[in-house]
Image (cartoon, rainbow, N blue to C red):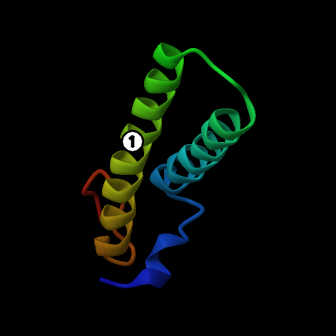
Amino acid sequence: MKISRLIQPRNPQFWLLIALNVLSSGISWILRSRDLPATLTWVLAGFAACNLVLGLWIAFRLMNDEVGKSSSGEA
């Protein structure tokens, strides 16, 4: 597993990881800066937790990806 494999601009999973990180940052900012109803706060916190799990899963997949191998398994 190599951390340097996280940066793969030609891999769509890389861009999904970037989008999830931006979304998580936006959710965190909203949760800290706004006084929201409890239900909405819990919903946003749930989305943030799902983003965390999905982001970690994608990051591990990118780090384990072999050089020159696409995400679909083709060479």
Q: What element carries label 1?
A: helix
User: Foreground residue, 68 or 62?
Assistant: 62
- 40 sits left or right of 46 in the view: right
User: Foreground residue, 71 or 6?
Assistant: 6
Tally the numbered discs.
1
Q: Decide: few, some or many residues near mark 1? Use Cα within 10 Å; few <14, some 14-19, many ≥20.
A: few
Q: Considering the image in quadrants, where does the C terminus appear?
A: bottom left
What x and y, as percent, mark residue 35? 69, 24
- 1 sits left or right of 30 in the view: left
Amino acid under disc 1: Ala
What x and y, as percent, mark residue 39? 46, 14
Residue beneath the point at 51% across and 52% down: 17
Q: Considering the image in quadrants, where does the N terminus appear?
A: bottom left
Q: In the rendered image, which residue does mark 1 sit on?
A: 49
Residue beneath the point at 58% across and 51% down: 21
- 64 sits left or right of 28 in the view: left
Residue beneath the point at 69% across and 33% down: 30
Residue beneath the point at 28% across and 73% down: 64
